[in-house]
Amino acid sequence: MSNDSVGKRVVQWFDHRLPLVTFVNHSLVEYPAPRNLSYWWTFGSLAGIVLVLQIVTGIVLAMHYTPHVDMAFVSVERIMRDVNYGWLIRYMHANGGSAFFAVVYIHIYRGLYYGSYKDPREVLWWMGLIILILMMMNAFTGYVLPWGQMSFWAATVITNLFSAIPLVGDSIVTWLWGGYAVGNPALNRFYSLHYLLPFLLVAVVFLHLWALHTFGSNNPLGIDAKGPQDQIPFHPYYTVKDLFGLGVLMIVLLAFVFFAPNFLGHPDNYIPANPLVTPAHIVPEWYFLPFYAILRSVPDKLLGVVLMFGSLAVPFLLPWLDTSKVRSATFRPIYKQVFWFLVVDGIVLGWCGSQPPEGIALILARISTAYYFLHFLVLMPLIGMIEKPRPLPTSIAEPVLKGGDAAATAPTRGRS
Amino acid sequence: MAETPAASADSVGGDGETRRDFLYIATGAVGTVGVLAAMWPLIHQMNPSKAVLALASTEVDLSGIEEGESVTVVWRGKPVFVRHRTAEEIAAAVDVDLADLPDPQADAERAEKPEWLILVGICTHLGCVPIGNQGDFAGGWFCPCHGSHYDSSGRIRIGPAPVNLEVPDYVYLDETTVRIG
């Protein structure tokens, strides 16, 4: 007992001077969360955990990797063969990147379905999109580092996107390369940026969480919590829920790591980079395929690049393009269906991106690229105006309590 | 943790208390074991790999080293002194009262064949490389970093180093070849 009070007093002394304990308590323990969050809400914290996993494995890989054109490929092979558990750490990092995108894409579609981008969460949505863009830069710079054939040609193709810029394009590409072609200077700077960007990512994740905790989580009903009866403390209810989600994610991720570590990669990247030969069929990693399809669907270089970057820019305007005041698609009969068209559109674009740009794949890519922009720029404003939303429940607790489910009411009883 | 509203909330109910405590401990225990197991690869990757450990021995050809000469070879990334000692140096090393030494050790224990002294050339104080034929002892070593004097057997005599220069494991493969490590 006396031990407890001494420890407690030390904590209080520290917390009075730097309120770290209070901060953690407020944001991870007491933090009042809507009582009706479904498993779709677990993907945010999963993304955070995967980011930590990527940073930890990445720092370890950096201890063994050599960023030089003559040694990069060999140093990665040394990691795979010689370094103790190097194979495990590298496969975790490579597949962890895919897991990061998978989790984040689900997280984004969750936000689209439940209107999580709407007032007052527009800045929260922006921070999320910035996180996605930083992730893409990070995935790209990381993909270059093993210096295999796919690494080299990915670096060449992606940097050449900037050559589409009128007048200064070629100068910008030369500046990016630090030479006449992708070579050692480019590899060195990509390595530098690949180490830097994750920490920028952490900073933006912090802003994302700050914005989130300012108004609290959205929820499947999309209505605001009106009081304690609508909320439960984050710990233990959502810590446990997120922990279970983490368990499921780890089963999937480790299944890839241990049983199909190269399933998502390309065999060509185990051939050392050769600036004189381009692989016959170069495609990016799966998480870039929809954007790659948009790029290739346009027969004009500049317009293709503009549309590809535009597909990332348009969602920034979504809070204003969506004219409906109702957040959750549960109460929006038309948008609820249109949402699934966008999901299918994304998958179709992904498939098109994986195919050579000809025949049916090219036609489908053009249609789905047009539909992507149609969805955001035309359908979202229009549906909000013509749609008649179903009546919203008066509170989060109401539909639950009306059901008379004893288990669901337990937390409320406990808090009173 | 026990102070959180959530935990105190459940103890109000009474019936759930034991079960929740058990679940907390079980979850914590499984989580701790899992995290520790996951940490091992992250720690072990910093240990030398088998490829590095495989390079752990060095062979030295002694035929070219004249009496009174010394060569420095690299063994496991460290300097190793191989000295062909003169009769006077051997005599000086043997003729010592062990009670006078900070780290008493007879010369016979430090050199399998008296004329060949093999030492790891790293000062036992803080890891500098001592300089040969310098210091207060003829045929000895002197460490310029912090002033340790070693005698012609590589034993610490004066200065801050706590113990004698290390003698690595070695075997004579034949009359003129020694394998260190």
Image: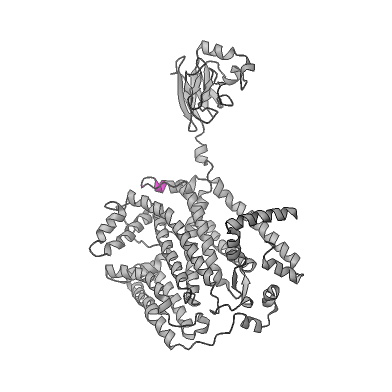
Is B13 in the magenta?
no
Residue at (58, 53) in percent of width and height: B38
Is A70 in the magenta?
yes
Q: Nearer the viewer, residue A359 or A89?
A: A89
Left or right: where A251 falls relative to B4: left
Left or right: where A117 falls relative to A247: left
Image quadrant holding the N terminus of chain A, namely bottom right
Residue at (27, 68) in percent of width and height: A302
Count how many numbered circles sit on residues in the image. Answer: 0
Q: How is the image coloured?
A: one colour
Q: Nearer the viewer, residue B34 or B121?
A: B121
Residue at (51, 16) in percent of width and height: B136
Q: Which residues are magenta?
A: A69-74
> From this viewpoint, is residue B84 visible?
yes
Image quadrant holding the C terminus of chain A, namely bottom right
> From this viewpoint, is residue A268 visible?
no
Q: Give residue A348's position: percent from left, percent from top.
A: 41, 73
Q: Give residue A245's position: percent from left, percent from top.
A: 58, 66
Q: Give residue B152's position: percent from left, percent from top.
A: 53, 17
Instruction: Name above or below for residue A416 compared with residue A263.
Output: below
Q: Give residue B67's position: percent from left, percent from top.
A: 46, 14
Instruction: Name above or below for residue A358 compared with residue A76.
Output: below
Question: Quick one: which residue is furthest to the right in this view?
Answer: B15
